[in-house]
Amino acid sequence: MSSLNVPLRRALRTDLTASLVVFLVALPLCVGVAVASGVPAELGLVTGIVGGLVTGLLPGSSLQVSGPAAGLTVLVYEAVDAYGLAALGVIVLAAGLLQLVLGALRLGRWFRAISVAVVEGMLAGIGLVLIAGQLYAMADAKAPSSGLGKITGLPGLLGDLAESTTALSAFTLGASTIMIMTLWPRMPTRLRVVPGALAAVVLATAASALFDLSVAKVEVRGLLDSIQPPAASEFGQLAEVGLLGTVLAFTLIASAESLFSAAAVDRLHDGPRTDYDKELIAQGTGNTVCGLLGALPMTAVIVRSAANAQAGAKTKASRVLHGVWLLLFAALLPAVLGIIPVTALAGVLVHAGFKLLPLKEIGPLWREHRGEAVILSITAGAILAVNMFEGVLIGLGLAVLKTAWETSHIQVEVVDSGSDPVRVMITGSATFLRLPKMLDILEALPIDRPIELDLLGLRHLDHACRTALDVWAERHNSEGTEPVRLIHAGLIHAR
């Protein structure tokens, strides 16, 4: 009996250690994402707590950790700006319920069918908007509302830094945070026990206090005061088309990010594989609870999940315990948030934004799959120029068009020996996308020679091409001296 308990005790001890690591990684990110989203800092902690205590208990992916994610920061900020903080709970609640429906219908696995180029382009676009917006926060300045406005306003931000000592001090503190996080992996192993983001925020906070810098600090409202369940009157906004589009965007992005993260986490451990439908239900349950509390939306977060797996976690106990530590911190040490400089959290998110950019992948992707690289770039650019939802829709539309174009390969071969009938063999998939090519060749055939049109090699013939072949054959038979003979397999009526 005791021998059976030894592996269990080892697993629990490892899970306890892993939970502390994940807690230390999650703490600055939960607060930073909330501040960048334009909501009280405590709401980020609430989402992290729900991600641990609710989603963490449910089946799906055993080692994946959920909480507020940098990938949704831009969308949340836009939603709060457009509809108000009171509507955030309604949006998150609706997205969570929609995830529950999708999971119950066993559609979780279909999220893996989303083009990787679109997902990477989405993350890249989020990263660009996040970086551009948080550069202003690093200088304690207000960022323009649009993505392009953030980019075009950067020269003015540089001018403010040159003219204002206060802005320059804040920006230097934020830049130091980024530098510490970048160099932290090269530090001695004993120092790297502390996550880089936490170390950077602690050092920046200490420097701010030591040098008495006039920089903005995180506003503290208290955990219970920050929780604001949506009022019944707010649900009327669900009738607005724009808000419904935001709900769909939350659902699509949160689900895709969570399930792609699950696939990545599965490669980091040898334990049970993810059940994607159950994971989607777990995420939907977590977002439903977050919506009822008026908190931020949650996704599975690869940074925390990877830290959990790399810390040696064996069971879901580690992610549940990380939620316990977040709850204890929010309940017992809320005043600590009030001494953290906003610029330090902005630096953490700028660093996170750079990690969303596929800088290493774009070169090989351009060389090997140029079309995918174009879709990635256009999706990212559209998100930056327009907004998140429309940018993703543009990317998905391009991916569908690219796939349709690539799968509609058609070959039209003309064999003319001089005296025999002209033989035309059409093979592949005849769709409207290739109709001009097919008609150009058919209409160039001689009308005073017998034509044999061989369609046996066609895998698919859509309505547009079928109608065009009917019309061409009728015209050729009425104008020419020799009839068209069709060789087919029931794809088209004989002439």
Image: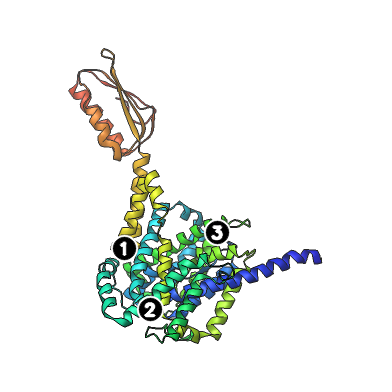
Cα distance between the residues tagged 2 and 3: 33 Å
Q: Nearer the viewer, residue 234 or 152?
A: 152
Q: CA distance from mark 2 to mark 1?
A: 23 Å
How busy is the neighbourhood of tag 1: few (under 14 within 10 Å), some, or many (20 plus)? many
The 10 Å Cα crowd at callout 2, few under 14, some 14 to 19, many 20 or more, is many
Residue of label 2: 85
Rendered location of residue 286, percent (x, y): 51, 70
Query: Which residue is tagged 1?
Result: 384
Instruction: Report the front residue among 424 and 221.
Output: 221
Which residue in the rendered view is the most extreme toward the left? Answer: 479
Vertical placement of 374 versus 124: above or below? above
Q: Is residue 487 left or right of residue 220?
A: left
Please, which residue is most extreme toward the right here? 1
- Identified at 39% across, 67% down, the residue is 247
Say which of 432 and 7 sits in front. Answer: 7
Disc 3 target residue? 265
**Mark 2 or 1: the one toward you:** 1
- Give me the residue at 32% from left, 68% from top: 242
Residue 368, above or below 487? below
Residue name at image x 32 percent, y 38 percent: 431
Q: Amino acid at mark 3?
A: Val
Q: Are marks 2 and 3 in contact (CB under 8 Å)?
A: no
Image label count: 3
